[in-house]
Amino acid sequence: MRQNNITVLNGISQVTLIDNAMVETRIEKDREFELKDAQQMVDTVQTIGNSRKFLHLTIFGERTVPSKEARQFSISKSGSQFKLAEAIVVQSLSQKMVFNFMINVERPSVRTKLFTSIDEAKKWLYSL
């Protein structure tokens, strides 16, 4: 069931409650994604989602990668407290390398998968 989308512009990201199951976050291109940005995203999801857990579709703009601190927070229990699972969409090989390392070595606390297609990412999330 579709509802009216709620969107919050938050620093370098835009967080949208897509439906009762999914939150989409779009992060601007050519930006430095720091710990404070990751923390703001969690706070925003908590607010617009009434502290519920959602499937997360996170889309990184070109040449934007998270700092080590932002990655560590994002994959922690605290940074994932409102996530059921996360699909990360990237645009470039360098982003792919960073996120593959994060997923395979740093080990997120929720199921996480990397994509280059938004449609494929959504399909995977809704299949869970």
Image (spheres, grey):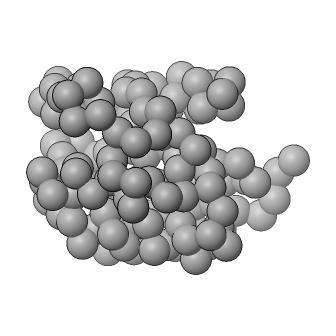
| Rendered view: 82 above or below 111 | below
Q: Residue at x 38, y 59 (%)?
A: 79
Q: Residue at x 23, y 42 (%)?
A: 62
Q: Residue at x 41, y 66 (%)?
A: 41
Q: Is residue 75 left or right of residue 80?
A: left
| Rendered view: 80 above or below 87 | below
Q: Position of residue 34 (x, y in %)?
A: 18, 63
Q: Residue at x 33, y 47 (%)?
A: 75
Q: How many marks?
A: 0
Q: Is residue 2 left or right of residue 17?
A: right
Q: Quadrant of residue 122?
A: top right
Please indicate, yes or no, whether residue 62 appears anywhere in the rendered image.
yes
Q: Is residue 1 left or right of residue 10?
A: right
Please indicate, yes or no, whether residue 30 appears anywhere in the rendered image.
no
Q: Is residue 116 left or right of residue 67?
A: right
Q: Quadrant of residue 128?
A: top right
Q: Position of residue 48 (x, y in %)?
A: 62, 72
Q: Position of residue 118 (x, y in %)?
A: 50, 32
